[in-house]
Amino acid sequence: MMKIVIAGPVGSGKTTFARELAKEQKVQLYELDNLIWQRTPQGDQRFSKEKSAQLLQDILNYPEWIIEGTTTQSWIQDALIQADSVLLLLPPYHIRLYRILKRFIKQKLQLERANYTPTMNLLKMMFVWNHHYETKNKLELQQLIATSPAKLHILKDRNAYSAYKKMIET
């Protein structure tokens, strides 16, 4: 059985890595964004923390799952506790900035799908969130998982991503 949480800042490659891993391992992938935001034609509406926590509990009842996202809110604690591994993707800051901008351009040109409407304001916020992850969120995640630090794997580049995939195949 496989229970993995994949965390990291915007532009770290969480979603891409999680999709690849889920496909290769034949495990269902869940995006934390979809537990935080209710997607509607009129725009995204934030779920209450209680609703997000309940949606997460429903997922945790399955025997296997991969959960990816950036949140470090306390309601994800149960996922961190139940996870076999917590992967923190931390490629270099400048690479993440490049990926954020590249993704935004692709989404504006409709070459890449997004769960949200790509706007200049959102692009600006992604740069802010990316910086905050370095200064705040990374430490919060490490504090949340402090009870079982052996689960935490910090992956800083594609070579580390590939090495992790090989490790779980054995």
Image (spheres, rainbow, N blue to C red):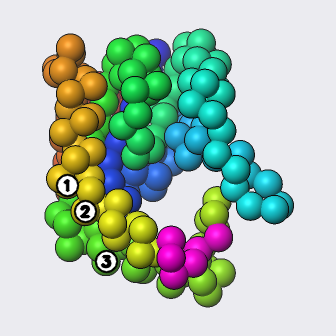
The residue range painted magenta reads 117-122
The residue at which mark 2 appears reads as 131
Which of the two marks, 3 or 2, is nearer to us in this view?
Answer: 2
Dot 3 and dot 1 residues touching (CB under 8 Å): no
Q: Is residue 93 above or below residue 14?
A: below
Dot 2 and dot 1 residues touching (CB under 8 Å): yes
The residue at which mark 1 appears reads as 134
Q: Is residue 139 left or right of residue 30?
A: left
Q: Is residue 94 visible?
A: yes
Q: Position of residue 28 (x, y in %)?
A: 59, 32
Q: Position of residue 56 (x, y in %)?
A: 57, 25
Q: Residue placed at 65% from the left, 28% from the top? A: 51
Which of the two marks, 3 or 1, is nearer to us in this view?
Answer: 1
Q: Could you tell me the amino acid type at mark 2?
A: His
Classify the position of the C terminus by image quarter: top left
**Residue 98 tag number:** 3
Q: Residue placed at 46% from the left, 75% from the top? A: 123
